[in-house]
Image: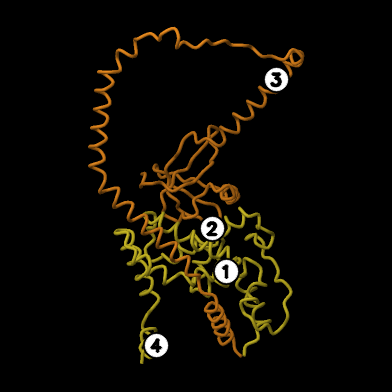
Chain colours: A orange, B yellow
């Protein structure tokens, strides 16, 4: 058997095996149902847009009118004595903890500082629009000023592990590069519109 | 007669025609949200995509990821701009979602690490079940081989797996050598 025949035999074996395992029908039903649901939702939303707005405006206007007519005297009217609620604030503290209070405060400050630092890492400080120019090995982006931004393969892998890279990105896609306060890249997602 | 007609059509249905058909259907779906266009695209690719994912995982994961890939296609329909490369885009999403799924379920092992070549699991000579034989190949070799059987070029496979073309060539060579050694043709 020559090389070409062997390749054909492997291709044929692959296709035969594939025919034995067709995709379950429930996947198609779920996908088409989702699509029909989305489509119907968009149609209903468009149809209901104008009447909904009118009703909302009418209800808001009536509410304002009622507040002006009925609400104003109620706001300034004092409550009768029998309706007043007596409030008493009691301070609770722990005498024994007073000695270790500075230590506790110090720990709390450290924890708070660490927490804030970690929160800063998660929070997007600013976002920069760019275009994905290449994703072979290190990823290459081009921003609106035509400057190149290279992101290492290792960082992309880390961001992927944290679900912070959109899996649908292809070359030519416009993206938003999200950075934290320290200027570290923390997220790459598709830009909703062409940004440059 | 019907089979003869199909055979005739297949002879003249070139890959470019299928590609342009994919793009036409997807453009129609993107512009009008037409369920029939999506359904036709699904019918064209679903079994192939599912089998690729099945070879790379297990039936439950393959079904879940297949569904997620199509939902992602629906969600990101405005972001597809690469003319004539719908199938490659679909499999790229499939590849990335499968790896995300493995990572989420902590099933990412050394063998499934795309940076390692891995070695084939022991398998008896003259295997008769090709599907099981494929499962014995290391993750990366199995993926390269499956994608090639789905009609992708070396450049396409490199792009889908996010590795250099030379790495794809090596993986394919190892995969084919193992399969040729153990596959018993009738």
Task: Name which of mark 4 and mark 1 comes first in the sequence.
Answer: 4
Q: Which disc, if any, is residue B7?
A: 4
Q: Which disc, if any, is residue A106?
A: 3
Q: CA separation, marks 4 and 3?
A: 81 Å
Q: Which residue is mark 1?
A: B54
> Does B98 sit above or below residue A108?
below
For the N terminus of chain B, the quadrant is bottom left
Please name the residue shown 58% across and 63% down the image: B61
Please name the residue shown 25% across and 49% down the image: A47
Q: Is residue A44 left or right of residue B89?
A: left
Secondary structure beneath label 4: helix
For the C terminus of chain B, the quadrant is bottom right
Q: CA separation, marks 2 and 4?
A: 36 Å
Q: Which residue is mark 2?
A: B96
The front one of B40 and B113 is B40
Please name the residue shown 45% across and 53% down the image: A133
Q: CA separation, marks 2 and 1?
A: 15 Å
Marked residue chain, label 1: B
């Amino acid at each position: 058997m020559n090389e070409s025949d062997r390749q054909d035999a492997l291709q044929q074996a692959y296709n035969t095996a594939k025919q034995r395992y067709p995709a379950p029908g429930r996947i198609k039903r779920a996908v088409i149902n989702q699509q029909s649901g989305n489509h119907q939702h968009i149609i209903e939303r468009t149809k209901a847009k104008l009447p909904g707005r009118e009703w909302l405006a009418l209800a808001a206007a009536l509410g304002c009118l009622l507040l002006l007519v009925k609400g104003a005297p109620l706001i300034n009217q004092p409550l009768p004595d029998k309706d007043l609620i007596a409030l008493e604030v009691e301070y609770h503290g722990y005498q024994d903890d007073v000695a270790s209070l500075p230590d506790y405060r110090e720990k709390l400050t450290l924890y708070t500082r660490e927490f804030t630092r970690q929160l800063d890492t998660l929070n997007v400080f600013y976002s920069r629009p760019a275009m994905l120019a290449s994703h072979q090995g290190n990823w290459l982006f081009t921003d609106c000023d035509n400057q190149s931004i290279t992101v290492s393969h290792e960082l992309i892998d880390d961001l992927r592990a944290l679900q912070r890279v959109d899996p649908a990105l292809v070359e030519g896609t416009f993206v938003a590069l999200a950075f934290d306060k320290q200027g570290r890249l923390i997220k790459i997602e598709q830009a909703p519109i062409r940004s440059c | 007669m019907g089979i003869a007609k199909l055979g005739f059509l297949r002879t003249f249905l070139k890959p470019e025609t299928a590609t342009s058909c994919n793009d036409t259907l997807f453009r129609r779906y993107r512009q009008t949200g037409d369920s029939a266009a999506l359904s036709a695209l699904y019918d064209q690719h679903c079994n192939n995509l599912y089998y690729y994912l099945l070879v790379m995982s297990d039936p439950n994961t393959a079904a879940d990821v297949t569904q997620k890939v199509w939902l992602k296609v629906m969600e990101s329909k405005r972001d597809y701009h690469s003319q004539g490369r719908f199938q490659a885009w679909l499999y790229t999403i499939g590849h990335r979602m499968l790896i995300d799924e493995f990572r989420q379920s902590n099933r990412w092992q050394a063998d499934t690490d795309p940076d390692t070549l891995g070695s084939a699991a022991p398998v008896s000579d003259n295997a008769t079940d090709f599907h099981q034989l494929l499962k014995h190949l290391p993750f990366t070799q199995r993926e390269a081989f499956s994608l090639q059987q789905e009609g992708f070029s070396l450049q396409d496979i490199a792009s889908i797996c996010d590795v250099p073309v030379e790495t794809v060539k090596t993986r394919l060579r190892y995969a084919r050598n193992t399969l040729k050694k153990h596959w018993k043709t009738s």
